[in-house]
């Protein structure tokens, strides 16, 4: 089991109850859609996995290690096992494609030889060969998100978290990004993708967790049609 | 820490410096001006205190002896004087020598004091120096009690006033320096906060990717130390040039003795440089911690 949530609730300091008694298990190698309308608590749920937010109640485990009880000094190691893909890409505008991806490895202290090798590899993986020297401003939205995905993959994470990765993209580009994420999942990386776009989820044939007002309202196993 | 990381820290620090050229320039200027004022105050204090020491050490007690004392009485008095605690030296000045001194300072070749006065009106005296000039009035009181001494002179009142002035000069310049240090740290913290603010997105990303706090901090500290030390260096060059030319011109202009001891001055300059670097670290530290809480 890669991820375990036990009776997790989150109440923000302003009193908003974003998650209400969530229990959930995710297997290694799984692809999980986190579905639900805006404000349902999807972002809150995934932020707990890399400890940007702590639960108010409950326990969370990643690879059998408690994220809640973890000391501050252990958080960097937790995060190195997780790749994060953002809706707004969060690329550094003054760095090239290559530098943006290398950045993720530099800041965890990787050697320059490993960086060169791995960055070249992930650039090929996401289909951006030839764009290494471009700046984010010179790329389309879909290409920028590919850079974001490559950066998330650079440190070979156990778990890839994508929070509305297609939220800023048109439907065709979204489909391409979905294909890329499915391919990454096929190579063994566990993927959690939060989205409110039903049309991307419907035909995918993956496990879908439906969230509404902080509660799990449905957990469709893979292969079932989502209505 | 890996050698590759050190290169990364240096590269990031200097990239940021050249990327935010205007901000870097503003920070260096701020530090330079702060250190310049600080250095000016330090040099002023050192000189004021040297001058005060000079004035203080000049303070002495003059004990005038009664007429018609025998030689042995005079030497007994010397022993009594030497026995007083806090007395550093006792120096006999005969009435003849006293007149010579007077002639030297007031007379001159065309005006012969000895001839005008006819006979020497001056008494024999002892000049007494204290270990610590602050004890002069206490010692003077005891000197007065000794038989054979009819008058004690130590610039009564003037001495007390001098000490009051020197104490206030010292207190005021210390307060001034402390205020300046606070102002400098505050200004640097503000400028570096702007630099960090411009990169908050990057810091947030680094933290989410799994950077340790120290990995995030290092480039900023290098940047802060560089800014602080560069500002300090500029201030020292300006200060040294200014003070050097002051020493050269002051000689001819005033009687005031300026501190020219190379060791003292180089210590001051090195301390100011270190001060600049420390201000950079301090300013960075204050500004950075807030952004690491991700
Ligand atoms: N940092 C925060 N402080 C207070 N309330 C928050 C914060 N983040 C999210 N919320 C609230 O929590 C609820 C769930 O938000 P979120 O997890 O972002 O949902 P989703 O990602 O599904 O749109 C919303 O009502 C939102 O306003
Ligand atoms: Mg969200």
Image (cartoon, coloured by chain):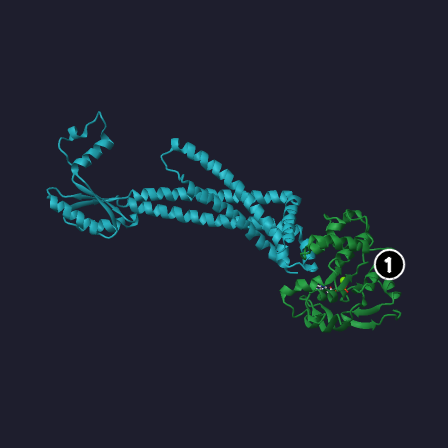
Chain colours: A green, B cyan
Q: Residue lying at the far front in this picture: please name it.
A: A113
Residue situated furthest top in the rendering: B110
Q: Residue at x 13, y 33 (%)?
A: B119
Which residue is at a point 81% across and 48% down the rendered structure image?
A130
Q: Residue at x 81, y 56 (%)?
A: A125
Image vertical order of residue A163 relative to residue B110, above or below: below
Q: Nearer the viewer, residue A136 or B27?
A: A136
Q: How far across and down, in percent of the image, does residue B148 sit?
A: 14, 47
Q: Which residue is mark 1?
A: A175
Res B213 → quadrant: bottom right
Q: Residues within 10 Å of mark 1 (few under 14, many from 20)?
A: some
Question: Looking at the rendering, in which quadrant would you find the N terminus of chain A?
Answer: bottom right
Residue A114 visible in the picture: yes
- Considering the numbered disc 1 on the image, is that residue within a helix, a strand or a loop? helix
Quadrant, the C terminus of chain A: bottom right
Name the residue nearer the viewer: A49 or B170.
A49
Q: Position of residue B269 (x, y in %)?
A: 47, 43
């Amino acid at each position: 089991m890669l991820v375990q949530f036990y009776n997790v609730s989150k109440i923000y300091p302003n009193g908003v109850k974003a998650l209400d008694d969530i229990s959930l298990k995710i297997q290694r190698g799984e692809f999980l859609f986190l579905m639900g309308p805006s404000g349902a608590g999807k972002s809150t749920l995934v932020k707990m996995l890399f400890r940007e937010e702590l639960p108010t109640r409950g326990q969370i485990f990643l690879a059998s290690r408690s994220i809640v009880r973890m000391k501050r000094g252990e958080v960097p190691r937790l995060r190195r096992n997780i790749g994060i893909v953002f809706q707004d890409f969060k690329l550094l505008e003054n760095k090239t494609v290559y530098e943006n991806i290398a950045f993720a490895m530099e800041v965890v202290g990787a050697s320059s030889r490993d960086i060169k090798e791995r960055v070249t590899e992930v650039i090929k993986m996401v289909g951006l060969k030839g764009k290494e020297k471009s700046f984010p401003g010179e790329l389309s939205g879909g290409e920028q998100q590919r850079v974001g995905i490559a950066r998330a993959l650079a440190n070979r994470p156990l778990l890839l978290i994508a929070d509305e990765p297609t939220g800023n993209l048109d439907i065709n580009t979204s489909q391409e990004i979905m294909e890329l994420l499915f391919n990454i999942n096929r190579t063994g990386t566990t993927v959690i993708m939060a989205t409110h776009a039903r049309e991307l989820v419907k035909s995918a044939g993956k496990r879908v967790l439906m969230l509404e007002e902080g509660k799990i309202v449905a957990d469709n196993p893979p292969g079932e049609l989502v209505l | 820490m890996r050698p590759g990381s050190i290169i990364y820290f240096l590269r990031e620090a200097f990239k940021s410096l050249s990327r935010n050229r205007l901000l870097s320039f503003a920070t260096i200027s701020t530090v330079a001006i702060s250190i310049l004022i600080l250095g000016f105050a330090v040099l002023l204090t050192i000189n004021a205190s040297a001058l005060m020491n000079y004035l203080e050490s000049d303070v002495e007690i003059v004990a005038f002896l009664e007429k018609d004392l025998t030689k042995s009485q005079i030497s007994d008095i010397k022993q009594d004087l030497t026995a007083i605690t806090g007395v550093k030296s006792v120096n006999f000045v005969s009435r003849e020598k006293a007149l010579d001194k007077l002639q030297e300072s007031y007379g001159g070749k065309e005006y012969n004091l000895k001839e005008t006065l006819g006979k020497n009106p001056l008494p024999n005296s002892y000049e007494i120096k204290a270990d610590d000039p602050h004890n002069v009035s206490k010692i003077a009181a005891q000197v007065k009690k000794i038989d054979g001494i009819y008058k004690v002179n130590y610039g009564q009142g003037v001495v007390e006033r001098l000490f009051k002035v020197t104490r206030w000069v010292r207190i005021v310049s210390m307060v001034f320096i402390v205020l300046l240090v606070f102002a400098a740290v505050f200004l640097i913290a503000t400028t570096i906060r702007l630099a960090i603010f411009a990169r908050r997105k990057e810091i947030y990303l680094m933290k989410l990717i799994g950077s340790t706090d120290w990995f995030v901090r290092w480039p900023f500290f290098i940047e802060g130390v560089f800014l602080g030390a560069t500002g300090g260096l500029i201030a020292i060059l300006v200060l040294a040039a200014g003070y050097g030319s002051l020493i050269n011109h002051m000689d001819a202009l005033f009687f005031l003795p300026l501190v020219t001891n190379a060791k003292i001055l180089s210590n001051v300059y090195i301390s100011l440089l270190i001060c600049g670097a420390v201000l950079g670290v301090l300013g960075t530290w204050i500004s950075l911690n807030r952004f690491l809480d991700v």
